[in-house]
Structure formats: structure tokens, C-alpha cells
Amino acid sequence: EKILLLPKIAVGTVESYELPKNANYPKVYAANAGMEWNPYEDMFNIAQGETPIKVFETNYDFNGSITQTPSKVFGNGTLNWDEARYSSRNMVFGPNKANADTGNLQIFAADPSKIAFETSNVRGGVDFDKRMGNFTTNVVGAETKFPLNSFSTNLNDYKWDMNAKTIAAKMGPSMAGSTAYWKSLNRAQDSLEFEGKAGVYSLKDYTLNVEQIPYIDIAD
């Protein structure tokens, strides 16, 4: 360890940092990490070294930095696991949860090099005990994509059931008075777009079932 003591903070590197799980904190481990301690604000910051920071008892990877205070642990970076990638500049961690007011989420297909679901600027989080994720777009009308299916939608409320491998989409309260649509991103489908107020996406067979469709225009 090498620590430099400055008038208001201490900075340096640590061989290891371990935070045990308790009622407020997740389990955290970092090796050969950068550190900054601000005793006046009661904040201890750890920045990853050559390897990601490990969080939760299942050792999910977090690329970025984590800050510990007496009441909470929060991070600036990306949480990676075999099912998804979740990033935020202010991700708050519970014992087995991660939440953010503003974040981006990508859910992988069976081939993790391919993205099945992608949404940006959302609030919500994931609960790894319940194996559920809930997200709402911060901007009404923002587009969420299903890249494998070449479709997008402006629906703004999403519920991800990790065990069932489904993503349910619907109109949230903030979409009152708006039209919910689904749009093809495949140029060969000649700008196909139609109204649909809900949908369920299967991460097992990558089928997209859209519901509450009043009609679909099939000719100009």
C-alpha cells in the first residue's frame, strides 16, 4: 500500500479492499485498487485496478469506481454479469440490489456478443434476490430497441423476469395521452410501423408478442 496524506484527503493504492455484506451494503472486493479517503465528508472511494471490482456474493463485475459512506454504497461505472450490462454514473447498491435514477441497460442474447434488448436513460433497477428488473424511461417517447428482431418501441415501462426470461413492456402513467407504437428497423419491411399498447419479449426464442393492436396499415 502507498498512501499520500494531503490536508483534506488521503490518496493512494491498496492491495485489497473488502466490504462485508450487511443490511445496507453489498459484499465488495477490489484488488490493487486506487483509493481516496475524504474524512471530512465521510466518504471512501475505490477505483478499480487491472481487474474489475467484485460486488455481491455472486461476484458480479463492476468496472469503474465505488464509494462507501456510513449509510450507502454507490458506484460510477458498469455492472456486468452473464445476462446483461447495466451502467450509471450514480448506481446505488443494496445487499443484493442495484438501482439508479439514470442508467443504461443492455440484455444479452444466448450469444453474449449480441444484444437482445437495449434501453437508455432509464430509472429503476435490478433485484438479484427476486431475479427481477424494473425500468422506466426518463423521457416520454424515447426509443427502446430489440436489435435481434430489428424492432423498436416508445413504450416506457419494462419488467424483466430473469428466471422466466421475459421482458414485459407497457405504457406507464407518464404516457397518458400518447400513442404507443412499434417500428421495424429493417429497411426491407418498408417502414413498417403500428400501434400497440403492450408487448412481451421472450429471451428463450426471441419472439416478440405485441398486444392491443387496433389495426395495421398494409398498403399506402
Image (cartoon, helix red, strand yellow):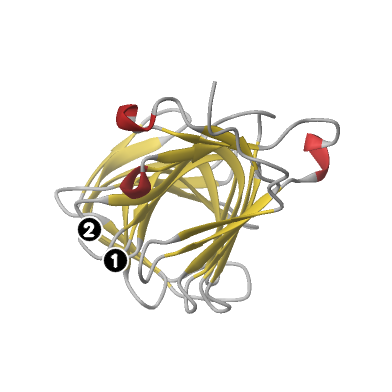
| Residue lying at 55% horizontally and 71% vertically, measured from the top left | 95
Left or right: 112 with respect to 100? left
Counting from the top left corner in percent of width and height, residue 66 is at 42, 49
Amino acid type, callout 2: Pro
Label 2 secondary element: loop
Task: Say few, some or many: other residues with alpha carbon within 10 Å of mark 1 (under 14 / 14 to 19 / 20 or more).
Answer: few
Residue 159 seen in the figure = yes
Point out the residue furthest to the front here.
219
- Say which quarter of the image contains residue 195: top right
Is 28 above or below relative to 50? below
Circle nearer the N terminus (1, 2): 1
Residue under numbered circle 2? 112
Left or right: 58 with respect to 156? left
Residue under numbered circle 1? 82
Task: Say few, some or many: other residues with alpha carbon within 10 Å of mark 2 (under 14 / 14 to 19 / 20 or more).
Answer: few
Residues at badges 1 and 2 in contact (C-beta under 8 Å)?
A: yes
Counting from the top left corner in percent of width and height, residue 80 is at 32, 56
Is 137 above or below relative to 73? above
